[in-house]
Image (cartoon, rainbow, N blue to C red):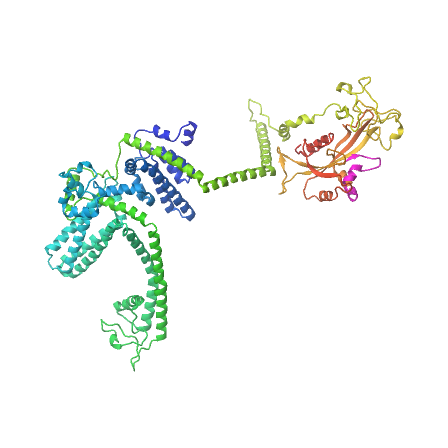
């Protein structure tokens, strides 16, 4: 769906326009995408979708709730922390948007809190925040202002509490200026609606119920202590009637379902509240005690059970203090401390029981009375913690009159084992004293201080968020008394009778007050959401500006840029190491093998008679054709010119002599070209046979006569004589081409254009500006050129001759050289010496014996490339070597 929107150039907002007028819960595409992104942990995508959503506050709170629920199911601690942190981010987004809305228009912002969102399960922002326990959102000043407004109803919030209580006790004061209302229509003193508006305000209902509850407890205590007769008095019947009104109210709360959730769902929500559980427990205990009280034989047990019910009803008073900013959080502290005590009792029970059993077994022999066993093991051991140490434990204060020797007296414990003569205890006093000291050490010092530390931790943890906790739990109290009938018990039965007639006889459904949940009209809702989206855009822009100015964000941006540069450097390293080229070559091999397999399959099918009307498509038979296609740019260099080129340069090297220009068509000797030969300044009158020393036979032709200057086998050059060459005719030379693979620091071969790169050994001789191969002219009878001997030390000459014999001959014969003339030319033998391994022993010895003579001679390994500054005719030899080895050139 996102791809289609992006392809069509549409935003996520257009999805709302394409949907139908009434959107069902399962037909909101933006909501579904947001939930999917949150569940799949696509944080960036979820933020983008949330930024495009219409109902952004509800969406942010819903995402916060989803993440908190997922965090409960997650077992990994790190993942749980990440989910909770992300949930807090979405809560902060909702707070930010609501803050901008509240600053702009308080009334509209409060409407956003109670507006029913059809897309999110007909819930509201406030309800989602409460279910997700987003305390920061509920503690927001705008939310608390709205709750205060609901708490005071139609009364002005400036009214003092003493004024409310005074009008509640003496209602004619309502028609004075003592109390004020927010609505102007309630301001006239003779208005009858002032009475209803006052007594339906939640703050008034709350204080009237407090007064009623205290009256009930006082009357209950009076009956238990003063007027508990075998036959109930009218005061006791009044208590029963009062309790019946409380039972009816709890039943109304259980069955009150304005949202149509069902009885089971309402029951689960009802019993999630701790105070509702306490109410049910008190009512059940009271009914059990009432049943026993009405039976004459169980009158006394009934009074005991009713006394226990009175304790539970008194504990219910703590719920009243939640309205107090000071005492409200303390109730949360007490509830959490009760949990701490519950787990602490397990540790304490281990020491109490262990010490009690050991003490009882050492002191008392065969105590058969169960009640005294419990006293000795548990009760006395527990009292010992608070300083009530038994007098007989050390034998000093032992008095036989305080115990029963045989355990026959039901009101005295059994005496310890004593001596028959003097009636003194015979148990080891030193052992019981040691056990008592250890017991007191661990219980009084260790365990009790541990309990104090646990209480201190709980107190500090709650005290740090006292204001948030009070504001959060304040909503439950306001919501309870906002929907509660105005009359206090027992007069609340009149309101219950009215509700019963309306629901049963008139069949009217339960309705929720608009102050906490309101469904807006379509036009009003659309205008409100548009206003919310506008302020959301302002909030996002403000957040972006703050993030840009934030120092931490700047550091993150710099770190991100550094990471990008590091990735680029790593990519460049990968390219330099040739990993990409190696993978491409491996892929090329696989394709080649696949082509061979396909060829075999096609031939097998044709051999078995499976033919087609069309001819078999051609397949590449080898990789050479593919390699040739990759080397199309290098093919023009392979094509050699038909005639020598360097030998016809106009300026002869090392002199001011100008050659006679010879065009290509006049180069062959067969073509007559008068006046095209010019005599060299070096050979005038020096044509003699003594120039031929040793084997001067050309590899292109045999010179039978030495009286006439021989002719260049490749044609005219525009200059006669021998020039700068040593002899007429062929001047033999030797050029060893020593190469190795170019490698990275890790030893991998570097590639370029899918080919391996070479390094060639070159030298720069004195008075020369270019690099050349380490070789040159061969003197008669010599095996190595003089220039090569300059490069190598004498002790390595024999080994290098062996390398030449093992090498590959790549060129033999005429060499196009600028020094060539019509009567003298260079003929060379080029031998390729390649070291394939970087650990080659001969290569290491060669490197150690380089540059043995002239300090001005420069020798190095040069990357083989066509652009390297090298002697002109040596590039042809390097090209042949690269072609031989399949390397890059």
Task: Tell me if I can see residue 301 in this picture.
Answer: yes
Vertical relation: 863 (above or below) 378: above
Which residue sits furthest bottom?
421
Determine the image quadrant of residue 872.
top right
Residue 542, horizontal then vertical, whole percent = 39, 36
Determine the image quadrant of residue 621.
top right
**Is 676 covered by the magenta stretch?**
no
Residue 37, horizontal then vertical, whole percent = 40, 38
- Viewer-side residue, 308 vs 612: 308
- Viewer-side residue, 550 vs 736: 550
Position of residue 114 in the picture relative to residue 192 (left or right): right
Vertical relation: 246 (above or below) 23: below
**Is 778 covered by the magenta stretch?**
yes
- Magenta span covers which residues? 775-799
- Residue at horizontal 32%, vertical 68%? 356
Residue 43, horizontal then vertical, whole percent = 42, 39
Quadrant occupied by the N terminus: top left
Task: Tell me if I can see residue 46 in this picture.
Answer: no
- Viewer-side residue, 827 vs 701: 827
Quadrant occupied by the C terminus: top right
């Amino acid at each position: 769906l996102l791809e289609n929107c992006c392809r069509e150039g549409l935003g996520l907002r257009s999805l709302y326009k394409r949907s139908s007028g009434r959107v069902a819960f399962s037909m909101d595409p933006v909501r579904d995408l947001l939930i999917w992104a949150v569940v799949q942990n696509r944080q960036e995508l979820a933020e983008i979708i949330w930024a495009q959503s219409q109902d952004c506050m509800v969406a942010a709170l819903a995402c916060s709730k989803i993440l908190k629920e997922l965090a409960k199911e997650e077992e990994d601690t790190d993942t749980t922390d990440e989910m909770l942190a992300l949930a807090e981010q979405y809560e902060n987004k909702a707070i930010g948007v609501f803050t901008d809305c509240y600053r702009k228009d308080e009334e509209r912002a409060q409407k956003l809190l109670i507006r029913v969102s059809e897309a999110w399960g007909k819930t509201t922002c406030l309800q989602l925040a409460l279910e997700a326990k987003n305390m920061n959102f509920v503690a927001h000043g705008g939310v608390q202002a709205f709750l205060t407004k609901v708490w005071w109803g139609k009364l002005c919030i400036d009214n003092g509490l003493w004024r409310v209580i005074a009008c509640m006790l003496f209602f004619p004061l309502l028609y004075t200026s003592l109390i004020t209302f927010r609505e102007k229509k309630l301001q006239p003193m003779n208005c009858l609606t002032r009475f209803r508006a006052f007594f339906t305000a939640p703050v008034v209902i709350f204080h009237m119920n407090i007064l009623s509850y205290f009256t009930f407890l006082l009357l209950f205590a009076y009956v238990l202590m003063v007027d508990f007769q075998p036959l109930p008095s009218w005061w006791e019947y009044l208590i029963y009637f009062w309790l019946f009104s409380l039972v009816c109210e709890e039943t109304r709360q259980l069955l009150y379902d304005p949202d149509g959730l069902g009885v089971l769902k309402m029951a689960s929500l009802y019993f999630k509240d701790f105070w509702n559980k306490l109410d049910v427990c008190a009512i059940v205990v009271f009914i059990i005690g009432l049943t026993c009280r009405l039976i004459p034989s169980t009158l006394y047990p009934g009074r005991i059970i009713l006394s226990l019910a009175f304790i539970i009803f008194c504990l219910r008073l703590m719920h009243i203090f939640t309205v107090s900013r000071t005492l409200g959080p303390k109730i949360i502290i007490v509830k959490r401390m009760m949990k701490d005590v519950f787990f602490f009792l397990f540790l304490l029970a281990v020491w109490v029981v262990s010490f009690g059993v050991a003490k009882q077994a050492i002191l008392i022999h065969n105590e058969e009375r169960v009640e005294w066993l419990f006293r000795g093991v548990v009760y006395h051991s527990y009292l010992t913690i608070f300083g009530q140490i038994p007098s007989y434990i050390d034998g000093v204060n032992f008095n036989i009159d305080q115990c029963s020797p045989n355990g026959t007296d039901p009101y005295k414990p059994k005496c310890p084992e004593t001596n028959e003569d003097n009636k003194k205890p015979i148990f080891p006093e030193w052992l019981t004293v040691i056990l008592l000291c250890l017991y007191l050490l661990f219980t009084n010092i260790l365990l009790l201080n541990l309990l104090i530390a646990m209480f201190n931790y709980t107190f500090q943890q709650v005290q740090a968020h006292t204001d948030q906790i009070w504001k959060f739990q304040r909503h439950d109290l306001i919501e309870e008394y906002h929907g509660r009938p105005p009359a206090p018990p027992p007069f609340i039965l009149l309101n219950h009778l009215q509700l019963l007639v309306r629901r049963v006889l008139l069949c009217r459904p339960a309705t929720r007050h608009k102050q906490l949940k309101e469904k807006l009209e379509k036009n009003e809702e659309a205008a409100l959401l548009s206003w919310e989206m506008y302020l959301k855009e302002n909030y996002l822009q403000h957040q972006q500006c703050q993030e840009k100015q934030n120092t931490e964000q700047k550091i993150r941006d710099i770190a991100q840029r550094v990471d990008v540069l590091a990735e680029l450097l790593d990519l460049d390293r990968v390219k330099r190491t040739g990993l990409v080229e190696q993978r491409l070559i491996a892929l090329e091999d696989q394709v080649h093998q696949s082509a061979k397999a396909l060829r075999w399959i096609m031939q097998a099918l044709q051999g078995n008679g499976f033919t087609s009307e069309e001819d078999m498509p051609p397949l590449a038979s080898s990789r050479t054709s593919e390699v040739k296609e990759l080397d199309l740019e290098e093919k023009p260099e392979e094509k050699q010119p038909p005639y020598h080129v360097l030998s016809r340069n106009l300026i002869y090297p090392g002199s001011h002599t100008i050659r006679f220009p010879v065009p290509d068509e006049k180069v062959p000797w067969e073509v007559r070209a008068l006046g095209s030969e010019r005599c060299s300044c070096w050979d005038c009158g020096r044509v003699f046979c003594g120039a031929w020393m040793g084997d001067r036979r050309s590899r292109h032709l045999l010179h039978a006569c030495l009286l006439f200057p021989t002719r260049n086998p490749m044609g005219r050059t525009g200059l006669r004589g021998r020039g700068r060459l040593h002899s007429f005719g062929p001047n033999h030379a030797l050029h060893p081409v020593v190469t190795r693979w170019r490698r990275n620091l890790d030893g991998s071969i570097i590639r370029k254009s899918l080919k391996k790169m070479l390094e060639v050994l070159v030298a720069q001789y004195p008075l020369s500006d270019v690099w050349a191969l380490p070789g040159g002219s061969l003197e008669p009878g010599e095996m190595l050129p003089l220039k090569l001997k300059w490069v190598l030390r004498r002790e390595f000459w024999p080994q290098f001759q062996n390398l030449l014999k093992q090498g590959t001959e790549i060129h033999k014969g005429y060499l196009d050289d600028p020094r060539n003339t019509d009567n003298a030319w260079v003929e060379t033998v080029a031998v390729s010496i390649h070291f394939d391994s970087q650990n080659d022993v001969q290569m290491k010895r060669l490197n150690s014996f380089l540059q043995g003579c002239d300090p001005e001679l420069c020798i190095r390994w040069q990357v083989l490339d066509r652009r390297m500054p090298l002697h002109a005719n040596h590039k042809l030899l390097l090209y042949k070597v690269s072609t031989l080895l399949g390397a890059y050139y």
